[in-house]
Image (cartoon, rainbow, N blue to C red):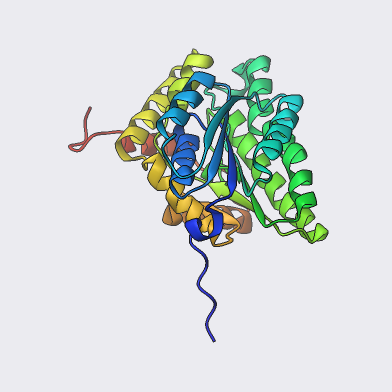
Amino acid sequence: MTDATPPTARERFAGGTAVVTGGAAGIGEGFVRHLAGIGMNVVIADLDLDGGRRLAGELAAGQGRVVATQVDVADPEALEGLAEQTFAQFGSVELLVNNAGLETAGLLWEIPVARWRQLMSVNVDGIFHAVRAFLPRMIELGRPAVVANMSSVGGVSSAPLQTPYMVSKHAVLALTECLHQEVALTGAPIQVSAILPYSVKSRIFLSAQAAAPTADPTANRLFDAMQAANVADGMDPLEAAAHMTAALAAGDFWVFSDDTAGKAALDARAEVLAGQSPPRDPHAMLAEIEAMALPAGGSR
């Protein structure tokens, strides 16, 4: 006897409603485009209202409705209002993608307190606020649905000069694993999944440098190299979203943009924990990242 073939994303989600935080750009935009393309109604929840409206306008001819709303995920009342409005307008939410997130560069002891709090309020608190706003309504409705939280391969690893981001993504993964267990206790037909993307094309490193510049030359060199590597080899956001949505539709808890890289990150973390190994040599890590950013031929 063989296992049943899992449903495709279109089979599972078409006709339903998705909410994507941080949906106006990057991975979030990829999700919005793909979910609209498979016939979902999509709510773009982003601080960048103009960007969200442009995207919604571009997708207006699709099968589902795409609407944009300005939301600060760090504001619990804003998320509560978004949930109330979304359920009133569409009647249900079949997929909540908690994607909004920030990066930042620099030595931990030089990170401004305000930037630390801002990053945590978006990357971690934003998911907490969204879960508090949407999940009780999803449970009460009693329909199959998915809550997908954006961690990262960084959520199972460590790296210098981006500590706040790494801390937040470890926290998101812990939150999601615990939430998965808590929802199971309710018996509700709600799937909880953790998304751990690898390199997906975006402006996250440029945005970090613009919003919270650092004077540390090594941190700036690292983020320049990471941005260059992202541009050169990062996955297209639409392609990544299609792959990750298929995994969500199949019921996976661990969802990767790149299965090979994602599983390798899990294996590497398992080896570190099993062997009680110290963190990797940061000089070697920086050299590897800078090498990834080099064009063919080996020099800039």
Residue 71 placement (x, y as % from top left)? 63, 25
Residue drawn at x 38%, y 29% is 227
Query: Can residue 278 be seen?
Result: no
Q: In which quarter of the image is the N terminus?
A: bottom right
Residue drawn at x 49%, y 51% is 244
**Which one is nearer the viewer's eye here, 156 or 34?**
34
Residue drawn at x 55%, y 54% is 13
Q: Which of the 4 image quarters holds residue 76? A: top right
Residue drawn at x 73%, y 37% is 128
Residue 214 placement (x, y as % from top left)? 51, 15
**Which one is nearer the viewer's eye here, 255 or 147?**
147
Relative vertical location of residue 194 with respect to residue 289 in this rendering, above or below: below
Q: Residue pushed farthest left?
A: 297
Query: Can residue 292 be seen?
Result: yes
Give the number of marks.
0
Q: Residue pushed farthest bottom?
A: 1
**Taking 91 as reference, is 220 left or right?**
left
Residue 120 placement (x, y as % from top left)? 67, 28
Residue 142 placement (x, y as % from top left)? 75, 56
Relative vertical location of residue 276 with respect to residue 158 in this rendering, above or below: below
**Which one is nearer the viewer's eye here, 283 or 261?**
261
Q: Quadrant of the C terminus?
A: top left
